Image (cartoon, grey):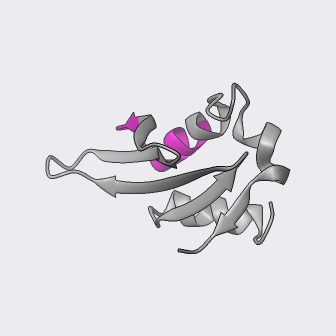
Amino acid sequence: MINGNVDEFLDNLWVGEEVIFIYNGKKYFAQGYTRNDNVSVHEVQLWEPEEKLVWQKEGGDASERMSAFQKEPLFDGKTFWEVEKEIEWVDD
């Protein structure tokens, strides 16, 4: 991971903190939160060059959601671990 520690990045996302990162020239925003109906959610949004929700996992516990995030081919058909060394953690 560029500009950060991958374990710290995942720990921050695990507890729901907002993280902003760039992969392959695209800016992403990831976060976890609890909805009004007490369902926990983790999601990843693409911010630039366009805005759209690219992944969302609802319910279960944080470990299940984080495992799903790490296994989902969200980044040009690749998983988080396949592109981790190319991800730049930014703090906007």
Q: Quadrant of residue 24?
A: top right
Front-most of residues 6 and 39? 6
**Which is more toward the observer, 70 or 38?**
70
Closer to the camera in the image, 30 or 64: 30
Give the answer, above or below, for where 56 lies relative to 89: above
- x 20%, y 50%: residue: 38
Tally of numbered discs: 0
Instruction: Locate residue 16 relative to residue 2 in the image: left or right.
Output: left
Q: Is residue 56 left or right of residue 64?
A: left
- Compared to residue 35, the image places residue 18 above or below, namely below
Q: Which residues are magenta?
A: 57-67
> Does 70 sit above or below residue 5?
above
Q: Residue at x 57, y 34 (%)?
A: 68
Left or right of 92 in this view: 33? left
| Residue found at x 74% / y 54% | 87
Residue 2 position within the rendered picture, expressed as x and y whole percent measured from the top left: 80, 64
Q: Residue furthest front?
A: 49
- Residue 62 part of the magenta segment: yes
- Give the x, y percent position of residue 58: 35, 37
- Quadrant where the N terminus lies? bottom right
